[in-house]
Image (spheres, helix red, strand yellow):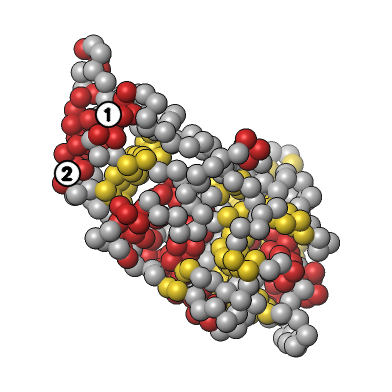
Amino acid sequence: MDYSAKTKRTLGNALVGDRIAVHTNGKKYEGFLMPKHSEDPDTVTLKLDSGYTIGLKPDKIALIEKARNVRPQPAPKRVHDSSKPTITILHTGGTIASKVDYKTGAAYPAISPEELSDAVPELREIANYNAKVVFQMYSGDMEPEHWKILAEKVYEEAKSGVDGIIILHGTDTMAYSAAAIAFMVQKLPIPVLFVGSQRSSDRGSADGPMNIICASLFIVKSDFSGVAVCMHGTSSDDYCLVNPAVNVKKMHTSRRDTFRPIDVKPYAKVWQNGSIEMIRNDYSAKDKKRGPVLRNKIGKKVAIIKIRPGISHKELEFYKDYGGVIIEGTGLGNAPVTVLDEYTAHHGKLLEAMGKMSKRGVKMFMVSQCPYGKVNMNVYAYGRAVQDAGIVPLAMTSEAAYVKLIWALGNFPKNAEKIMLENFCGEIVENIKADTFLI
């Protein structure tokens, strides 16, 4: 447990998973003893009956009950129902596919079909499920190499005859991974939906169950094929939105309706009762006879640099040996390249660096750091100057631009710039309508 010798003496015979009472500062707390979490070895970690975890410095500890069964037992096998469609669930990590052990507070992957249907009983009525672990990791730890592996798994499952695929994924980098699969596995015959959870499964506000229910219903009841993200559409349990993988962004750190479509409308709204409202019809319909195409090579030396007051040309020049750079410009896609006085004298060096790197062969593209709206570098003089230096405007999100450049350099290294300007799966938004703002 790595608790201090003093704390171990206070714990006595109590072990991780045991129910104990901790007395401290005249108060009593009951719960399950967990492994040491705090950096302070004298702080005892206790999981309360409410599901929350606290750290306490104990005056006295009393053992209430010894743990009988710490690790969850396998759920009984379920019979395949040939009358129902089959969905493959690919687990990559995140809280949505974890089963919390209330004895220790530890999270184990709840990835078998039986565990999933026990955790979310509504799934039994929708489909049969195959479940496979691809990764067990935080999405913030993912690298482009992981997208390659995930793309191969999606490709294999799409060819196997299943009716749809759900990818359980952490929310932090879901927009990147979803875009990567959309580029890497094209002409999909079935739906591939990314599903995550903003709230852990031991909280009353957990959103994972509803998200996976709505994703399953959409796979079974719609004629959609392709890659999308299915998450809460409001902060309440009203409905889920099915958003295009290449036009979605995580807009809030903790809200359950964090994923919003950028400059486009979602494909659909899905309710837990099975109702589906299709909002768009510009997608390929399901067709199991259609063979998917896998292109999952990567050109990893790609960077994103954010324009801001005070930026130095040296920051851009750091990437002079990279294959490509996505520049997040201000507003319509601008950068500080105009020399006006002694304080702006260094702006000329930024423009010079852009020109040199472009001539050197570094592919550089401009997106806006504004979530919504299209880049237009012809409005202001400094936007035109940046274009003249070799920076190419892109009408897409920074996530999609970054992923697409990695994909383009990996699969089409000699034609990467041309590929970046072609619209493969709706990533380039040409006509932005006013009613797509803050959907």
Residue 381 in the image, given as x and y percentages of width and height: 32, 23
| Mark 2 element type | helix
Q: Residue at x 66, y 58 (%)?
A: 281
Frontmost residue, 15 versus 247: 247
Residue 359 badge: 2
Residue 87 in the image, given as x and y percentages of width and height: 65, 76
Left or right? Give the position of 12 relative to 362. Answer: right
The residue pinned by badge 1 equals: 385
Identify the amino acid type marked 2. Lys
Tally of marks: 2
How dense is the environment of label 1, judged by Cα within 10 Å: few (below 14), some, or many (20 and up)? Answer: some
Q: Residue at x 57, y 74 (%)?
A: 189
For residue 368, which quarter of the picture? top left
Frontmost residue, 74 versus 264: 264
| Mark 1 element type | helix
How dense is the environment of label 2, judged by Cα within 10 Å: few (below 14), some, or many (20 and up)? Answer: few
Residue 371 in the image, given as x and y percentages of width and height: 51, 38
Residue 234 in the image, given as x and y percentages of width and height: 72, 45
The span from disc 2 to disc 1 (Cα, nearest Å) is 15 Å
Note whether residue 34 is visible.
no
Residue 14 badge: none
Q: Give the mark nearest the N terminus, 2 or 1.
A: 2
- Relative to 382, say whether 161 is above or below: below
Q: Residue at x 72, y 57 (%)?
A: 278
